Image: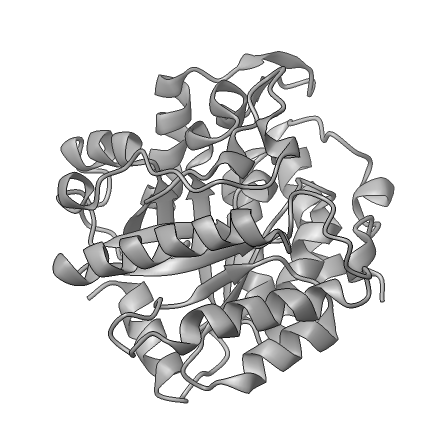
Amino acid sequence: MTRYDTKLARIKAGNYRRGDFIIADAKDGDMGPSIRSCGPKLGKDGTFTHYRTRAEFLDQVRAVIAQDVVDILLASASSLEILNETGAFDGTSVKSAFRANDATDIWVGRGASYAKQPSRPYRTASIEASRRQSDLGLYSITFNNDLDADYESQLAFLDFVDEASDHEFQYFLEVFNPNVETGIDPEQLPYYINDCICRALAGLTRAQRPQFLKIAYNGPKALEELASYDPDLVVGVLGGGAGTARDTFELIHQAEKYGARIALFGRKINLAEDPLAMVKLMRAVADGEVSPLEAVKAYHGTLQASGQTPLRSIEDDSKITEKVLMG
């Protein structure tokens, strides 16, 4: 069993304790922004040199896995195949997972406008083929208060659930905030999403349900409502944009405080000056060893010691810039 399996078992048994918070690194961006998702290669002076090549990107992924601090490493099926072939997970307790679908709202290549239209379901990855790389996958769905689009997405999700059951395959469910205008009052939107999630899962048996959820953090009240609604439903939060270092640590802190038990961050790790230092301090914040502000100071201390020029001054990096975290 991996560290993820052990922690999730305790969480589902109602025995969650500080230190059981699960941290995942999402390195599946090649199925969305593609080349840009590999992240910028920065010089020691902090200037952009080029977007990482796939080989450079996979080297960074291997370093995260070897650090053995994150509990889950999520990648595309093709990246995971290479990582497995090169023994990247050997000797670690990191759980591997792959993105099992790539709906149109993540088709955000340069110049593309697909994501400006209601999300449509699509799957590049095959469970039958990809299951050789991992027995855990991410399925993503977006509800937009658009009957035709949401109906099509729901049918595709049920097809996936049936296929996953046939292959004894486990998955976790990512629910994005709407990617188009919904006509719903912004104050009501988090609760619309909560209702959509619970309705979509109500007809599934325990064996068909996701292992956990990955959702946007829409504030304390909405998170507490969803996390307390059903003890069988383990809620996790996604990272969103890169933000400041304080945004990253504050999101971990608030999510855990209001009932989330998992955080799955992509850009907040991948776009950091020092991803390994960022991950280490995310763990420390989740475990209650340091406050978010103390973590920012420690992070900048690490950058200074390594001679890496930070993207922002410590004063700017200590600011909360994401509105949902300011409440």
- Choose between 207 and 46: the one closer to the eye: 207
- Choose between 126 and 137: the one closer to the eye: 126
Residue 66: image x %, image y %? 32, 43
Number of callouts: 0
In this image, 14 relative to 148: left or right? left
Residue 155: image x %, image y %? 38, 54
Q: Residue at x 41, y 54 (%)?
A: 70
In this image, 260 relative to 208: left or right? right
Image quadrant of residue 12? bottom left
Q: Residue furthest top?
A: 49
Vertical relation: 253 (above or below) 245: below
- Choose between 33 and 195: the one closer to the eye: 195
Q: Residue at x 73, y 77 (%)?
A: 221
Residue 60: image x %, image y %? 41, 31
Say whether residue 289 is visible.
Answer: no
Vertical relation: 14 (above or below) 51: below
Residue 90: image x %, image y %? 18, 46
In this image, 286 relative to 126: left or right? right
Q: Residue furthest front?
A: 148
Quadrant in which the C terminus appears: bottom right
Q: Residue at x 40, y 80 (%)?
A: 11
Image quadrant of residue 16? bottom left
> What kind of colouring is applied to the model shown?
one colour
Vertical relation: 32 (above or below) 295: above
